[in-house]
Amino acid sequence: MTARGERRYERGVALITVLALIASIGVLVASSVAMSQYSTAETDTFLSLQRSALEAESAANRILWMLLADRAKHADRKLGGKSNTEEERFLADGTEHFVETGGRTVSVRIFDAVAGLDLSGSNPAYRLEKHRGTRDEIREQLAARLRDYVDSDDLAGADGMEKQHYRGAGIPVLPRNRPLQFREEYLWLPGAEKSHLYPEDGVLDAIRLIPPEGMRALSGRPNLYATPVAVIAEQCALTEEEQKHLAEALKLWRNARVPLAETLPPAFSGKLEMNFSTRESGAYTIQVDTASPENPGRRLRVTVRPIAGEKYFEYYQFLLY
């Protein structure tokens, strides 16, 4: 190769090297820009979630005082009827309210806290067995396991599970051999995932909230407007078509305030009111949703019982997720 040819070859290698370096630098710059944008978006999302938590708490407090003002003004707390006044009513009926807080409009719903199946106390298996007129195999098995879970002995009943069975299944710390301390313990029972008593939207509303130690029980008939449709269907032995009809009727009530009496046959409504309450119990769950298409947000659920004649509340739950 001549000297001129060698110089041309060297210039070609240098050009390729320079182009490779420019390409590498371009990739690094693009990566830096992308990482910067990602970090900015991540920070914005984190700040929005932190802000939404404070906004949710503010909205819950505001709705609570509006609820108390409504209770002081209206003694009749029957749910599901048409309002005879133009003012906005605040009842535990699951209908949607909107609150301005922190420059954001958030959605708030009020539910009665006495809802779902009551599995508190020393004999929750009895309530689970009697929850439906026709008992099925899954229900009987779960009732037997629940009975062994809360009793104080290590003797397993038919279809039940005690310490030796949990050890064999690789669960060394169960059963607790005492009443349920919180409702989510039900999900620890092997086979619970096959039951209709399962979380919806991240919360186990199908089972009634179990009060912390030392607080009053949430006793009474479950509220019709706060109990999941699947639980209502089981309790009233509804057909699949009736369950679908009920779900649509409750949706119309919550979103458009169309009374169930206008969307369900009288006999159907009568069956529901025989098994479920349509009046407030005095304990409430306030649910606040701060998410919107423009901003991420969080959901807050506060369960509280105002004490009549006193200036304090009993707080059963404060759940932010």
Image: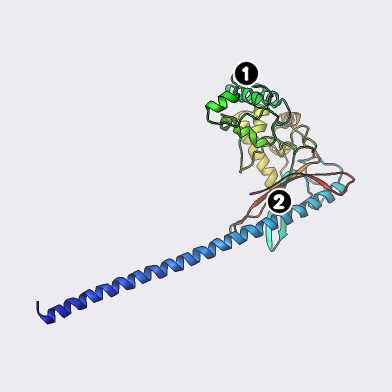
Q: In this view, does 314 lie to the left or right of 10?
A: right
Q: Which colour scheme is used?
A: rainbow
Q: Quadrant of residue 204?
A: top right
In the rendered view, tell whether residue 226 sits above or below residue 272: below
Q: How crowded is mark 1: few (under 14 residues within 10 Å), some or many (20 or more)?
A: few
Q: Which residue is rendered at x = 85% and y = 41% of the image? A: 76
Relative vertical location of residue 92 with respect to residue 106 in this rendering, above or below = above
In the rendered structure, the answer to whether residue 4 lies left or right of residue 101 reads left
Q: Position of residue 119 (x, y in %)?
A: 70, 30
The reply, left or right, for residue 193 in relation to residue 232 is: left
Q: How many numbered callouts?
A: 2
Mark 2 or mark 1: which comes first in sequence? Answer: 2
Rendering quarter of residue 20: bottom left
Within 10 Å of disc 2 (Cα), the crowding (few <14, some 14-19, many 20+) is many
Nearest the camera: 161 or 107? 161
> Residue 3: where, in percent of width, then height?
12, 81
Q: What residue type is labelled 1?
A: Gly
Looking at the rendered structure, the secondary structure element under dot 1 is: loop
Tell me whether circle 2 and circle 1 mark residues in contact (CB < 8 Å).
no
Q: Name the residue under label 2.
A: 108
Specify the farthest residue to the bottom.
4
